[in-house]
Image (spheres, rainbow, N blue to C red):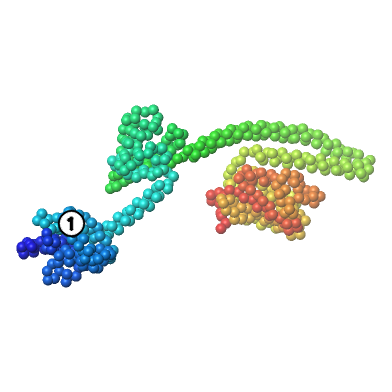
Amino acid sequence: MLPAENQEMVQSIIDHLPSGVSMFDSDMQMVVCNRRLRTLLEFPDSLFEPTLPSLFDLALFNACRGEYGQGNPESLAQEVCVRARSMQPHVIERQRPNGVVIEVRGVPLPTGGFVSIYSDITDRKHAEQEAKRFAAYLDAVINALPQGVTVIDENLVIQLWNKSFEQLLDLPPGLMKPGVTFEEVARSNAERGEYGDVDIEAKVRESADLARRFLPHRIMRQRPNGMTLEVEGSALMGGGDSRGFVTTYTDITQLREAQDALEQLNTELDQRVKDRTRQLRALNTDLESFTYSVSHDLRTPLRSIHGFATVLAESEADRMSEGGRDALHRIQNNAGRMGKLITDLLSMAQQSRVELNMQPVDLSAMARSVVVDLQRGDSARQVEWRIEEGLSTQGDPSLMLIVMQNLLGNAWKYTGHCEAPCIEFFRVSEGDGMDGFCVRDNGAGFDMAYVEQLFQPFKRLHMPNEFEGTGIGLAIVHRILLRHHGSIRGNGSVGKGATFHFSLPWIQGSPSVL
């Protein structure tokens, strides 16, 4: 037993400690303990009255309430006492039935007996378990990655790596182990010729010096086996300073091969475009020669045919039979029609070659001017015109005039047999960066079964004796709109009119329809 004054002093000290404390003498009799011990181990106060218990008393109490698991309580208590008499320093962890984990640290006293410290490490154990679980998850994730991964600390010790890293670099077995350094891996690579014919130690020093700078980097590395690796490193920051870096290694061999193949394909395609351009230029030259031939070589005899036919009609008509006069009249009409076909054909060729002069175009004003010309040509006709104001676009004014002349001219022509003709020009909602416009009439219309022929040269959906024309106008419109990156389509019904919808790229400042 301690002297009373010493015992009081010891008691005062240990009662202020956060851990449970007990002291036993060489006879295994408790000399002193603190309140934290009783609370931590849930000992009743009666166990400590009227005198402090022996080690056997405490062990027996614990055994009886299942603290040591299954077995005879007295035998279990005796085992505790036997271990204690060995007087060896010890640290054990014990989980109580209530789930609390206790760490017990025992230290022998010089005079015999021992002191034990009891700490609740439940939270610490839970944290350790969570850390182990997280480490297992992390290990599973990085080892599932096809990319190689390494984490290197500020001392260039490789703290983390995955299997793909070893496989991609064909590292020798046994190299990657806890504590392996960046220099050791670099040396292995240099010895195996990964960096070419170099001084091994000089290359290792160079690589290590560069690594210590912890600079973000991305490099392409060609391995001796032909594999191309993309190596990308990012610094690990802590407290504003670099604490190492994470590096990924990606096999981009197939990607590089695909890129090389694409570059080769682009080169070949570029050459094909150049060859095709030369062919088109030659074709355009031939077309210009043909156009010149049509313009001069064909028109001259055609004018002669028409001229002689006219002379015959004027001077010899009285001596001709009815059949002769009819045949002569047919010659004149067909010669005139042939002349107009040649003119339209040349016009279509010209519209395909003329250089675009892009500028803002007031389509509403242009439509009104076309209407004036049409009405002037047949002032007796009464047509209701509905032209929306403020319609504008960006285009070549002369070509857009041809578009409006053809579309409005067709509407004027095909409403010729209509009792109350009505022709409209208005904007429609288009979207996708395009402005939409419509020319609609209530005239002859057409059969939608033949809609694909609308914009083909010389394809007519009406007989010549019904409506005059050569069938070239809509083909010209189609080509002009294509050159403006636009489009056109038609809808109609026989006897109920037609609608031609054309679109052009939207320009800044033009009104939109929501």
Q: Quadrant of the N terminus?
A: bottom left
> Which residue is more in the foreground, 511 or 75?
75
- The answer to whether any part of residue 288 appears in the image is no
Residue 94 higher or lower than 460, as above or below:
below
Measuring from the top left, give residue 164's x and y in whole percent. 41, 43
Q: Residue visible at 23% across and 66% down?
A: 73
- The answer to whether any part of residue 145 appears in the image is yes
Q: Kindly identify which residue carries mark 1.
A: 106
In the picture, measured across the screen, residue 18 lies left or right of residue 263, that is left
Residue 130 higher or lower than 36, as above or below:
above
Residue 228 higher or lower than 65, as above or below:
above
Q: Residue visible at 38% across and 37% down?
A: 172
Q: Secondary structure at mark 1?
A: strand
- Tell me if mark 1 has few (under 14), some (14-19) or many (20+) residues whose alpha carbon lies within 10 angstroms of its own: many
> Which residue is more in the foreground, 67 or 39?
67
Q: Residue visible at 34% across and 28% down?
A: 199
Hey, which quadrant is residue 21 in on the image?
bottom left
Measuring from the top left, give residue 24's x and y in whole percent. 13, 61
> Which residue is more in the foreground, 473 or 62?
62
Q: Residue visible at 28% across and 57% down?
A: 125
Amino acid at pointer 1: Gly
In the picture, measured across the screen, residue 65 lies left or right of residue 460, that is left
In the picture, measured across the screen, residue 258 lies left or right of residue 4, that is right
In the picture, measured across the screen, residue 96 lies left or right of residue 392, that is left
Q: Quadrant of the C terminus?
A: bottom right
